[in-house]
Image (cartoon, grey):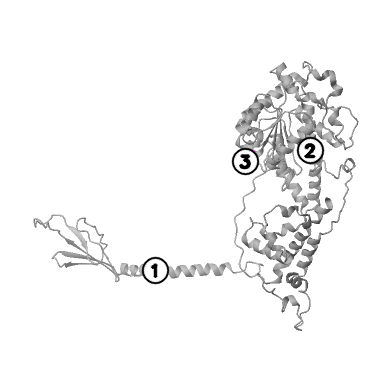
């Protein structure tokens, strides 16, 4: 329906009615030029109401005419549907929820388990030889200088046969002035108070053409000779391995004996001159160079053991003078260079400029994590013969053994994913409490194959229980040392204190006749103590009694301790020695207190 009206400005209005609630009024106004008062020719539609009106740009309004009452009814129906759209949506949602709770067939009444998408199939395990970004073979990531050295060694071995191996150097062309007085030469080691293990003669190593000289061989037990043979064979063929004997079985001695055979030494004074005479006779002659990487606390021990078991030119690449030691090793004036894991990581580029014939990693379980910085740095070490020493090859998981063996022989064991699938998983499942018979059988077969077929090539481990017949008998001697008079006095004074009394009698019936125990009735708190509860003093009281039994100086507060600890120790000292505690507290940092024989019964007994 459309009607014509005159607007307030005298222009006709066009009214379009779509419904009773929808009224749109559009009129056309002719804007005037304010400056000139001239009427513009273009007409601009203007919408009356609350809508925005632009005086510059004309807005076009589409006018939809209403032809009949039927169209009006359709508009009302559409408007009603629009108003009820939210209510209709809520009803549909509620109906869907009720439908989902209806049981289906023979199912129990209740909510139907929602359907879940079919899980994606697991990725199959990679077969040997497949390489991924996470566990690629180690030989593919080795530096170029190691690949070239390995290729050159294999070529020399194939072309020269035994002459291409790292056999001990010969000294036939070297003249030793000491040869005329062999019987007068000093030998090492010397243990005057110990009995030798073997007769005085050289031991030949059949698989590596090496010789353990008699001065050293006479002190080695049979399992140590086997360890020396294992290590020297690895050296000759430039392979790697791990010596994993129990702690205390002499891994350091076996290494020194193996190096003695590798350098062709004889265990006497002439060994101190061998390197110098070889360099003077022929600068191009091959002479072994060894690098030992160990924790910093073991450098001094390695040096002392080399001195005890022979004549060696040993230096340490650590501390302020490490550059001097590196220059000496580079020029061939050092037989064995010792460094730490931290120092190697910081200076690996300099150390790897030297082609080491053998690298020994003491406490090699430090490189058990394949993604750690230490392991990544050690993988780049410039040596084909890599020997690890550890008493705990596996500490937490079986993958650690793969990391150690892979460091010694990069890529030989394949990727770590294969190791996990073939070895780690069967062993883990077989050790679980709910493992089936088939899983147990598979685990045992895996362990047997691992121990009998794979590990003997790269890993040698002897336990004390297996070679007990070769070890000396253990003698335990228990010595009871009585307390001194001062210790006894302090001990008795503390036993008579209120602290011990409250603890000792806490389970007795309270004297208030309540029938309850003292510690939970009238004697719950110790007077003049903070904290006051007697339960807070049970373990501290035991610790104080232990200190009084060992040494009274341990009970004296130290000036470096926090004030709270000093106050607590001072209160215990005051209880134990009420007449002497002030003098002791005044001189609490004096070392004389530890040297006082009255404070320790052990000192008086041992003296």
Specify whether residue 417 is in view: no
SS class of the residue under badge 3? helix
- The image quadrant of residue 97 is bottom right
| Residue 299 position in % (x across, y down) | 70, 37
Q: Quadrant of the N terminus?
A: bottom left
From which residue to which does the magenta span run? 371-375
Which disc, if any, is residue 81?
1
Image quadrant of residue 372? Answer: top right
Which residue does the image show at 76% across and 32% down from the upper left?
307
Q: Residues within 10 Å of mark 2 (few under 14, many from 20)?
A: many
Residue 207 picture location, percent across and down: 82, 27
Disc 2 + disc 1, Cβ < 8 Å? no
Residue under the point 44% across and 70% down: 87
Q: Find residue 373 and name its label.
A: 3
Label 1: which secondary element: helix
Q: Position of residue 449 (x, y in %)?
A: 80, 40
CA separation in Å, label 2 and label 1:
91 Å
Q: Is residue 373 magenta?
A: yes
The number of numbered discs placed on residues in the rendered structure image is 3
Check disc 1: other Cα within 10 Å, few if <14, some if 14-19, many if 20+: few
The image's mark for residue 236 is none
Task: Report which residue position mark 2 lands on.
Answer: 251
What's the CA distance linking mark 2 and mark 3?
26 Å
Does residue 513 lie above or below 78 as drawn?
Answer: below
């Amino acid at each position: 329906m459309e009607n014509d009206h005159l607007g307030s400005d005298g222009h006709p209005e066009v009214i379009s009615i779509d419904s009773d609630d929808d009224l749109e009024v559009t009129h056309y106004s002719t804007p005037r030029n304010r400056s000139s008062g001239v009427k513009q020719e273009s007409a601009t539609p203007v919408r009356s109401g609350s809508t925005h009106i632009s005086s510059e740009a004309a807005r076009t309004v589409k006018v939809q005419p209403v032809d009949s009452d039927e169209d009006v009814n359709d508009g009302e129906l559409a408007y009603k549907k629009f108003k009820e759209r939210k209510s209709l949506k809520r009803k549909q949602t509620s109906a869907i929820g009720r439908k989902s709770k209806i049981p289906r067939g023979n199912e129990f009444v209740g909510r139907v388990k929602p359907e879940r998408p079919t899980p994606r199939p697991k990725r199959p395990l990679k077969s040997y030889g497949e390489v991924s970004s996470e566990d690629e073979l180690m030989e593919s990531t080795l530096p170029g200088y190691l690949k070239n050295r390995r290729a050159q060694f294999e070529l020399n071995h194939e072309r020269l046969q035994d002459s291409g191996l790292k056999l001990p150097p010969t000294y036939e062309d070297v003249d030793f002035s000491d040869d005329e007085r062999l019987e007068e030469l000093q030998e090492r080691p010397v243990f005057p108070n110990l009995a030798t293990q073997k007769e005085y003669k050289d031991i030949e190593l059949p698989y590596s053409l090496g010789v353990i000289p008699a001065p050293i061989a006479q002190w080695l037990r049979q399992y140590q000779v086997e360890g020396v043979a294992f290590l020297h064979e690895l050296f000759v063929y430039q392979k790697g391995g791990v010596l994993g004997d129990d702690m205390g079985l002499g891994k350091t001695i076996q290494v020194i004996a193996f190096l003695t055979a590798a350098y062709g030494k004889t265990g006497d004074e002439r060994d101190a001159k061998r390197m110098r005479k070889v360099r003077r006779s022929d600068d191009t002659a091959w002479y072994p160079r060894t690098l030992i990487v160990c924790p910093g606390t073991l450098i001094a021990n390695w040096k002392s053991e080399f001195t005890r078991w022979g004549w060696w030119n040993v230096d340490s690449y650590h501390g302020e003078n490490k550059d001097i030691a590196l220059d000496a090793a580079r020029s061939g004036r050092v037989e064995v260079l010792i460094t730490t894991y931290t120092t190697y990581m910081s200076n690996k580029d300099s150390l790897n400029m030297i082609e080491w014939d053998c690298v020994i990693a003491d406490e090699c379980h430090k490189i058990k994590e394949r993604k750690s910085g230490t392991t990544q740095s050690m993988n780049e070490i410039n040596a084909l013969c890599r020997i690890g020493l550890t008493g705990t090859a596996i500490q937490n998981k079986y993958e650690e053994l793969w990391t150690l063996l892979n460091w010694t022989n990069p890529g030989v064991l394949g990727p770590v994913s294969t190791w996990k699938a073939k070895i780690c998983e069967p062993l883990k499942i077989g050790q679980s409490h709910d493992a089936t018979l088939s899983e147990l059988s598979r685990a045992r077969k895996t362990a047997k194959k691992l121990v009998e077929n794979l590990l003997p090539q790269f890993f040698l481990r002897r336990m004390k229980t297996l070679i007990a017949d070769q070890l000396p008998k253990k003698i335990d001697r228990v010595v009871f040392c009585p307390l001194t008079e001062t210790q006894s006095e302090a001990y008795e004074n503390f036993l008579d204190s209120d602290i011990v009394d409250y603890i000792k009698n806490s389970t007795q019936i309270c004297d208030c006749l309540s029938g309850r125990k003292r510690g939970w009735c009238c004697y719950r708190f110790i007077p003049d103590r903070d904290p006051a509860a007697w339960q807070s003093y049970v373990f501290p009281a035991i610790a104080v009694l232990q200190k009084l039994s060992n040494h009274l100086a341990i009970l004296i507060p130290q000036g470096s301790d926090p004030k709270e600890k000093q106050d607590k120790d001072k209160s215990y000292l005051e209880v134990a020695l009420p007449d002497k505690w002030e003098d002791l507290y005044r001189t609490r940092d004096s070392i004389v207190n530890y040297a006082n024989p009255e404070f320790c019964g052990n000192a008086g007994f041992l003296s």
